[in-house]
Image (cartoon, rainbow, N blue to C red):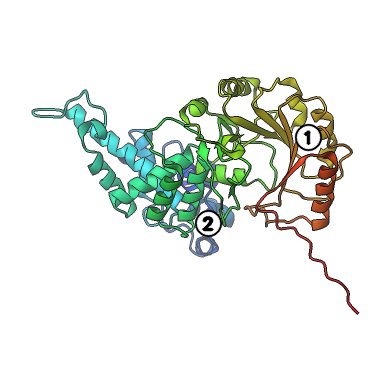
């Protein structure tokens, strides 16, 4: 669905990357071998671009040319019938590249769109004994298996394997933290698609046809990004009607995950997830952890960039779901003062460094909530509080490894000091599983 117009020489500064290429493959980076080749030999394979100078094929060659200071790049200009034709061409020109599992799943989505487009074209042609034009897609035509197998073949796997991989990936894209964990495990080669699918279904028992529900958390830790899925005595569920954050903390695992699955960590409201509480079966004979739901674990609901119009619908759902405890955590404790919290809301603030102590104390003296808690995770330096009496609970943890840096464990003396402050104030203490700080003392002997 494209036609060649002509060949042309273009300045690298005239060209721009295709947004769909970034969505599918992420930010491109040319390796040193390619840069050296371009420096010695120039561009050997012409770039394919659109009439608007958008690159279809050759993103890494373009970046290498810019790195080498080339003034002109040989290009083929093609004209495409539709934006989908452009997107499909991008995938076609990346057949030989090494791809991550997540990139393959994104390619699968493009192939699905393409198969649907071909089906629509066949329907529009109709004809004698043709297809019923009232039907809209492969599912209507009874060709689900054919489409699935065709897409799987494009990705080098069976149709059934693709369906299992896509099931977990679709949940990950929808913000399911456990699905994110299993998708990353497959991407890193630590689990097969089949094993990841079986374990995910066993833990969550999920069916993609179901309505949005809470995300069930498990005691697991991603060895690549450091994300934890912690079900012990804290919150067995998470709920992300809002995702994304502009705070830019260098230890943020959520940003790594968000960018990996969505290509961005910009704040986003997901109104379709507001029905999750009423769609999640309430557990029989629940413990406190069974009732606890961590709200917006993939962002900060009270960041100054989040409009009230996003927060108010969340509060409304919380009030309408009294059987659950909803845990809110923010680094903007002063903004909490403008809201009236439902009775089933637990309200907390993160204090990772000493400069956050005073704003936390001053705000929480005025905040009214059933449970008020303090999260010292990651615990990055010694903390001294003047008064902890306004809190009911303190969580203590270390820093998990992410793309910006290694894990970090606080000194035991810091933990012991905070533990003693909490005990003196009569508040409950919870040590996260990633907290390895412990006394390592020896007697001197003779």
Residue name at image x 69 percent, y 41 percent = 248
Along the viewing direction, whichever of 410 and 446 lies nearer the viewer: 446
Q: Are marks 2 and 1 in contact (CB under 8 Å)?
A: no
Of 5 and 238, nearer the camera is: 238
Outermost residue on the left side: it is 128
2 vs 1, front mark: 1
In the figure, 338 relative to 193: above or below?
above
* The furthest residue to the right: 446
Mark 2: few, some, or many residues within 10 Å (few <14, many ≥20)? some
Q: Position of residue 197 (x, y in %)?
A: 40, 49
In the displayed structure, 11 sits above or below 299; it is below
Viewer-proximal residue, 189 or 396? Answer: 396
Residue placed most toward the observer, 397 or 1: 397
The quadrant in which residue 259 appears is top right
x%, y% of residue 425?
A: 84, 39
* Horizontal and vertical percent position of residue 225: 58, 53
**Mark 2, residue position:** 30
Residue at the spot of label 1: 391
Q: Which mark is residue 352?
A: none
Camera sees residue 383: yes
Q: Residue at x 62, y 20 (%)?
A: 312
CA gap between label 2 and label 1 equals 51 Å
In this image, 302 relative to 99: left or right? Answer: right
């Amino acid at each position: 669905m494209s036609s060649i117009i002509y060949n042309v020489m273009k300045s690298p500064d005239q060209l721009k990357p295709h947004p769909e290429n970034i969505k599918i493959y992420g930010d491109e980076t040319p390796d040193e071998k390619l840069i050296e080749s371009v420096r010695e030999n120039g561009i050997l394979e012409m770039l394919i671009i659109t009439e608007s100078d958008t690159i279809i094929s050759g993103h890494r060659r373009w970046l290498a040319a810019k790195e080498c200071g080339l003034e002109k790049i040989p290009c083929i200009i093609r004209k495409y019938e539709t934006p989908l034709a452009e997107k499909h061409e991008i995938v076609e020109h990346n057949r030989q590249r090494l791809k991550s599992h997540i990139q393959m799943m994104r390619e699968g989505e493009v192939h699905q769109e393409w198969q649907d487009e071909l089906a629509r074209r066949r329907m529009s042609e109709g004809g004698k004994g043709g297809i019923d034009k009232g039907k809209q897609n492969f599912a209507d035509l009874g060709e689900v298996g054919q489409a699935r197998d065709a897409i799987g073949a494009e990705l080098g796997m069976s149709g059934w394997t693709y369906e299992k991989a896509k099931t977990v990936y679709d949940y990950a894209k929808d913000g399911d933290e456990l699905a994110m964990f299993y998708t990353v495990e497959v991407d890193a080669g630590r689990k097969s698609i089949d094993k990841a699918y079986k374990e995910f279904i066993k833990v969550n028992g999920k069916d993609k046809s179901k309505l949005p529900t809470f995300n069930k958390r498990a005691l697991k830790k991603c060895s690549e990004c450091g994300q934890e899925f912690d079900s012990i005595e804290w919150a067995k569920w998470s709920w992300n009607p809002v995702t994304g954050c502009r705070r830019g903390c260098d230890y943020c695992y959520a940003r790594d995950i968000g960018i990996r699955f969505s290509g961005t960590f910009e704040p986003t409201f997901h109104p379709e997830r507001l029905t999750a509480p009423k769609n999640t079966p309430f557990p029989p004979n629940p413990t406190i952890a069974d009732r606890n739901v961590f709200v917006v674990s993939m962002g900060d609901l009270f960041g100054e960039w989040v409009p009230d119009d996003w927060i108010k619908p969340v509060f409304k759902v919380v009030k309408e779901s009294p059987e659950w405890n909803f845990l809110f955590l923010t680094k903007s404790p002063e903004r909490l003062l403008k809201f009236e919290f439902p009775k089933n809301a637990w309200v907390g603030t993160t204090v990772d460094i000493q400069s956050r102590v005073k704003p936390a104390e001053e705000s929480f003296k005025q905040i009214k909530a059933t449970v008020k808690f303090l999260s010292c995770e990651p615990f990055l330096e010694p903390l001294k509080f003047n008064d902890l009496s306004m809190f009911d609970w303190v969580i203590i943890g270390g820093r998990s490894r992410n793309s910006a840096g290694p894990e970090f464990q606080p000194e035991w003396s810091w933990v012991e000091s905070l533990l003693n402050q909490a005990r003196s104030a009569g508040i409950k203490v919870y040590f996260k599983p990633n907290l390895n700080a412990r006394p390592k003392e020896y007697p001197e002997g003779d």
